[in-house]
């Protein structure tokens, strides 16, 4: 970029992790972007600088890396777009004297043990948990938590490196390691997305995990009493964690008895195409909103959804893709908006076992929830990525 172009920019941002929607939003806001990513892109022409390097986890390794990257010019803001960027972004904000919040806020929203211990002090209802380093045997774990046991890495989000097991030998492999053991929750899982500005929640949405790892739908069609209970708990958690700004993605469970239990919270935009669904349902740009609150700017949020929106995430058995079935018939679904595929015939794919392993998605939206569900049921029956053993 030449000097004349640079003068038009309103802020200088270090963006850690690539999300196309966020890059588009920042550029529309005339922001000067330096991108730090560990994944190669097809093109880099939209960025002032690109740091194509691994994103470390430890504070000292992050600082050592940043010492090799003097800012040009000084960054006003450091923004994290993915989970593994949250902790490095907090370190980078202090290193470059950019806009900061308390470092403990980031730790509480990234470290599951710190998060749950903090919220337990505020009487937040949640499943029982144990730090694996504080227990001596799998038997002791099972005696306290029951079976099955959920095993999570302390610093990974959502379904990454998550295991659910009844096997005592498998549990024993994680004893005395930096993992979290939790009792298994049978409730309906869902999430709440919130935008926070100057310590106040400006917008909330409840997303139904219609089918775990496969179908996300929003806004969740719940009774007003249940919504009030969920949003009240969500606000209590954000206040307890002292979150002043940003976007939160918190996961909860709704039990058959109507109790709402906290699962975990992330201080960054959600995956699972939820940002696309927010746009379709509420008719606003959640990426513009995120870019704004990260820079301390006001944003006018919608007060309610105009329609329901759904993402059907595509998967397949592991192997070689031999055919793509039913996609040419999607236009007959009244609520169908768009679909995209990450694979072609002949590609080798793996079985979906965690968030982020999808092969593409189909987006639906409708004011009529039953119509949307009908189209979704048709798609589940007729749409498929078919594979054969490799």
Image (cartoon, helix red, strand yellow):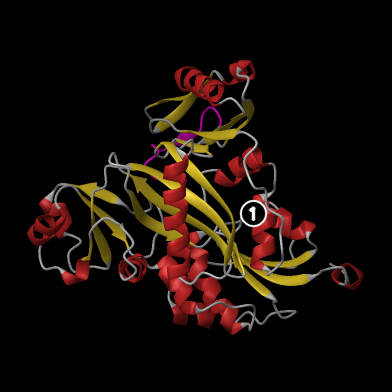
Location of mark 1 (residue) = 41
Residue 25 counted in the magenta span: no
- Residue 159 lies, in percent from the top left, at 37, 50
Query: Which of the pair 80/274 is nearer the observer?
Result: 274
Residue 50 picture quarter: bottom right
- Residue 55 seen by the camera: no
Query: On the rendered image, what quadrant is the N terminus found in?
Result: bottom right
Q: Quadrant of the C terminus?
A: top left
- Magenta stretch encompasses residue 347: yes
Name the residue located 63 percent from the left edge and 79 percent from the top edge.
69
- Residue in front for this viewpoint, 138 or 48: 138
Question: Mark 1: few, some, or many residues within 10 Å (few <14, many ≥20)?
Answer: few
34 on left or right of 225: right
Image x and y of residue 263, in percent: 35, 54
Per the image, label 1 sits on a secondary structure element best described as loop
What secondary structure is the stretch in magenta mostly built from? loop
**Viewer-proximal residue among 205 and 287:** 205
Displayed quadrant of residue 244: bottom right
Q: Which residue lies at the image location 69% right of the left edge and 49% below the top edge?
A: 285
- Of residues 193 and 375, the one drawn nearer to the viewer in this rendering: 193
For image coordinates 68% across by 52% down, the residue present is: 301
Note whether residue 193 is visible. yes
Which residues lie in the magenta part?
Answer: 344-356
Q: Work out whether 278 lies above or below 233.
A: above
Q: Quadrant of residue 375?
A: top right
Tell me how many marks there are: 1
Q: Which residue is at a point 52% across and 82% down the rendered structure image?
A: 63
Q: Residue 15: where, in percent of width, then height? A: 63, 66
């Amino acid at each position: 970029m030449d000097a004349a172009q640079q003068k038009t920019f309103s802020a200088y941002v270090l963006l850690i992790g690539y999300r196309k929607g966020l890059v588009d939003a920042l550029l529309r806001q005339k922001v000067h972007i330096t991108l730090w990513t560990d994944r190669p892109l097809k093109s880099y022409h939209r960025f002032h600088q690109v740091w194509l390097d691994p994103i470390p986890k430890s504070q000292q390794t992050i600082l050592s890396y940043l010492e090799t990257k003097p800012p040009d010019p000084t960054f006003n803001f450091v923004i994290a777009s993915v989970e593994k960027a949250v902790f490095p972004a907090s370190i980078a904000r202090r290193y470059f004297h950019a806009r900061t919040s308390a470092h403990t806020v980031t730790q509480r929203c990234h470290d599951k043990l710190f998060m749950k211990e903090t919220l337990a002090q505020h009487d937040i209802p949640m499943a029982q948990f144990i730090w694996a380093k504080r227990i001596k045997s799998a038997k002791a774990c099972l005696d306290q938590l029951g079976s099955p046991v959920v095993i999570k890495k302390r610093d990974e989000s959502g379904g990454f490196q998550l295991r659910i097991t009844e096997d005592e030998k498998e549990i024993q492999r994680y004893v005395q390691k930096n993992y979290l053991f939790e009792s298994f929750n049978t409730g309906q899982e869902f999430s709440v997305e919130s935008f926070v500005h100057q310590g106040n929640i400006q917008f909330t949405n409840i997303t139904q995990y219609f089918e775990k790892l496969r179908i996300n739908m929003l806004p969740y069609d719940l009774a007003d009493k249940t919504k009030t209970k969920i949003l009240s708990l969500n606000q209590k958690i954000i206040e307890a964690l002292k979150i002043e700004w940003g976007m939160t993605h918190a996961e909860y469970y709704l039990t058959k008895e109507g109790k709402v239990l906290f699962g975990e919270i992330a201080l960054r935009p959600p995956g699972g195409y939820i940002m696309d669904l927010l746009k379709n349902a509420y008719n606003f740009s959640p990426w513009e909103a995120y870019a704004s609150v990260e820079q301390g700017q006001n944003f006018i949020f919608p007060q309610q959804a105009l329609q329901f929106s759904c993402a059907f995430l595509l998967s397949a058995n592991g192997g070689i893709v031999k055919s793509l079935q039913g996609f040419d018939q999607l236009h007959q679904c009244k609520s169908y908006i768009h679909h995209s595929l990450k694979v072609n015939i002949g590609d080798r794919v793996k079985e979906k076992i965690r968030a982020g392993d999808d092969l593409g998605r189909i987006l639906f939206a409708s004011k009529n929830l039953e119509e949307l569900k009908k189209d979704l049921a048709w798609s589940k029956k007729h749409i498929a990525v078919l594979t054969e053993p490799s």
